[in-house]
Amino acid sequence: QVQVVESGGGLVQPGGSLRLSCVISGRTFSTLTMAWFRQAPGKEREFVAGRKRTGGTTYTGDSVRGRFSVSRDNGKNTGYLQMDNLKSEDTAVYFCAATAGSPITSSFRSSSTFEYWGQGTQVTVSP
């Protein structure tokens, strides 16, 4: 059984940074494509960033491009979301997602592409 566990959320001031971690167990990590989504109260789940399992190609959402970056360490079965220059509108629950498939570029931004999900970690950006 695949388990996805996020950590690293918390309260941060505007302009600050956080790094979220995502540990995946139950499946060989290197065979998984992973992504991050977020959901703010009253809003739909939004694609944040993703990384293909091979080749290192990454994708980021329009609202976070230039501020957030995604990486992974296959040896540690862990993915990361580095968030810099945080803004109040980044406040949300952040979810790590993974798929055993090989999504095409246009599918990366769809939550339905990913079959494995964590419970989420809260990120609050406030003075």
Image: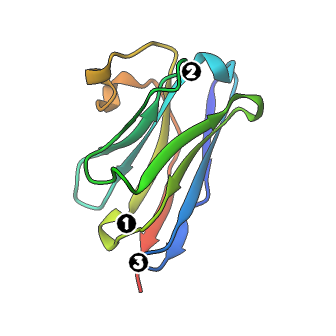
The residue tagged 2 is: 32
Of labels 2 and 3, earlier in sequence is 3
The residue tagged 1 is: 91
Q: Is residue 102 left or right of residue 43?
A: right
Q: Which one is in front, 37 or 52?
A: 52
Label 1 close to label 2 by CB (< 8 Å): no
**Which corner quadrant holds the C terminus?**
bottom left
In the image, is residue 11 above or below residue 76? below
The residue tagged 3 is: 14
Q: Position of residue 35 (x, y in %)?
A: 45, 35
Q: Residue at x 43, y 52 (%)?
A: 68
In the image, is residue 44 above or below residue 58? below
Q: How is the image coloured?
A: rainbow
Three-letter code for the amino acid on which mark 3 is drawn:
Pro
Helix, strand or loop at mark 2: loop
Residue 45 occupies quadrant: top left
Helix, strand or loop at mark 3: loop
The answer, for residue 1, to whether it is visible in the render is no
Instruction: Give the number of marks.
Output: 3
Query: Label 1: how many residues lie within 10 Å, few (<14), some (14-19) or many (20+)?
Result: many
Of labels 1 and 3, earlier in sequence is 3
Of labels 1 and 2, earlier in sequence is 2
**Which corner quadrant holds the N terminus?**
top right
